[in-house]
Image (spheres, grey):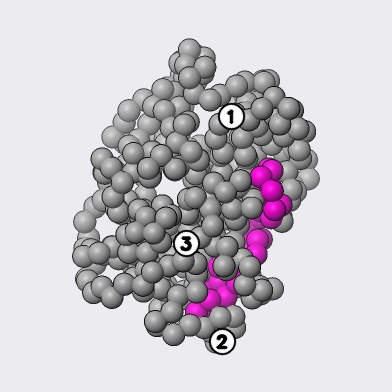
């Protein structure tokens, strides 16, 4: 748990903008910013390292052309999730395969082999791994590139033979068959830590006022290391200012516009932008476009039941406008806040419409 002295210090930290901080403090990265490496004609943009997250996780965007990918490999100590942000990609787990499109995901336990091949140009994946450290070899390789897109001829950066895998580090290779893809409609989370595919806007769903939250991963599926929520919603006002003592929140905008308020600084996030709010960061957010999609990755899973407490179970995959009274939701939240690692510190922020950072 964060100490009172540490909390006071974190409350005062303005987010670092468009740079990795090298310590566990708030920061924001616009799309394309981070440490960039080209590996086998794929541009890995590292957006979080163990050094930036207190060892909790690391993350990168992977951008590539049709045909780029990686053969079967596993990480013995890391739980991973891959989310498709743009394009189309085929993923394999042992004995099964799916073709995934934006919002779809695959979740890979420690030791489980996974492979992928991009099926369209400018396909973009989010790679998420917990605990941190899987990207250390890449980030420390000295092979950083200036470009924000992979090379047109595929000759830049690092090229490996099929028997090697440069990133992520500590990967073990596996000689497994690449089976044909199934069109199975994967919409149910497993009961335990298993490899699985999940389609966008499925999984366990909870309705909010003018929005809907879909769990992509839960503590039971990640060994308690993290959980994820894909939120789809219309224009929504700021929620009250608050912070958490025990967990880190990470906001990824997949489409639309999201205003993020972090320790007194307001910034606008659009598609591909990312904000990291470690424990102790005073924050709030507001949706500023219809049908905005925001992916939340939270570690650990201590805050998971927040969405169960404040939302209504639903089988819908889109939100219904005016479905729930916001006052009812806040009443539920007030009654349960003490058990949710949630501390309110002020009303919703005033919208400043300041120059975007």
Q: Measure the C-alpha gap from mark 1 to mark 2.
A: 47 Å
Q: Is residue 357 visible?
A: yes
Circle 2/circle 3 CB separation < 8 Å: no
Q: Within 10 Å of the Cα at label 3, are there few (<14), some (14-19), or many (20+) other Cα atoms?
A: many
Residue 64 screen position, x and y as percent: 49, 72
26 up-or-down from 19: above or below: above
Q: Which mark is residue 125?
A: 3
Instruction: Between residue 337 and residue 143, name the one nearer to us.
Output: 143
Q: Is residue 127 left or right of residue 55?
A: left
**Residue at x-position 22% and y-position 60%:** 183
Q: Within 10 Å of the Cα at label 2, are there few (<14), some (14-19), or many (20+) other Cα atoms?
A: few
Instruction: Check if residue 32 falls in the magenta segment.
Output: yes
Residue 1 screen position, x and y as percent: 58, 29
Along the polypeptide, which appears first: circle 3 or circle 1?
1
Instruction: State the count of labels.
Output: 3
Circle 1/circle 2 CB separation < 8 Å: no
Along the polypeptide, which appears first: circle 2 or circle 3?
3
Q: Measure the C-alpha gap from mark 3 to mark 1.
A: 32 Å
């Amino acid at each position: 748990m964060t100490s009172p002295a540490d909390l006071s210090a974190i409350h005062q930290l303005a987010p670092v903008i468009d740079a990795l901080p090298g310590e566990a403090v708030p920061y924001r990265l616009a799309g394309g910013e981070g440490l960039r490496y080209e590996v086998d004609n794929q541009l890995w943009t590292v957006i979080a390292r163990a050094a930036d997250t207190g060892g909790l996780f690391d993350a990168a965007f992977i951008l590539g052309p049709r045909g780029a990918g990686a053969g079967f490999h596993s990480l013995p100590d890391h739980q991973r999730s891959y989310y498709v942000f743009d394009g189309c990609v085929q993923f394999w787990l042992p004995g099964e395969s799916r073709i995934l499109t934006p919002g779809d995901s695959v979740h890979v336990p420690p030791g489980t082999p996974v492979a992928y091949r991009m099926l369209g140009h400018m396909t973009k994946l989010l790679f998420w791994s917990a605990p941190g450290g899987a990207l250390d070899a890449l980030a420390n390789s000295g092979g950083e590139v200036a470009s924000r897109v992979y090379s047109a001829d595929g000759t830049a950066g690092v090229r490996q033979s099929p028997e090697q895998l440069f990133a992520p580090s500590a990967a073990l290779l596996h000689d497994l068959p690449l089976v044909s893809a199934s069109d199975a409609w994967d919409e149910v989370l497993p009961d335990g830590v298993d490899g699985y595919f999940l389609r966008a806007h499925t999984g366990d769903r909870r309705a909010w006022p003018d929005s809907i939250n879909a769990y992509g991963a839960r503590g039971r599926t990640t060994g308690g290391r993290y959980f994820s929520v894909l939120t789809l919603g219309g224009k929504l006002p700021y929620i009250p200012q608050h912070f958490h003592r025990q967990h880190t929140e990470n906001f990824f905008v997949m489409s639309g516009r999201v205003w993020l308020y972090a320790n007194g600084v307001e910034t606008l996030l659009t598609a591909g932008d990312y904000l990291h709010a470690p424990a102790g960061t005073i924050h709030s957010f507001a949706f500023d476009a219809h049908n905005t999609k925001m992916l939340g990755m939270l570690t650990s899973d201590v805050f998971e039941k927040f969405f169960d407490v404040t939302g209504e179970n639903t089988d819908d995959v889109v939100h219904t406008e005016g479905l729930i009274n916001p006052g009812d939701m806040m009443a539920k939240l007030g009654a349960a806040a003490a058990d949710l690692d949630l501390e309110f510190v002020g009303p919703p922020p005033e919208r400043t419409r300041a120059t975007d950072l």
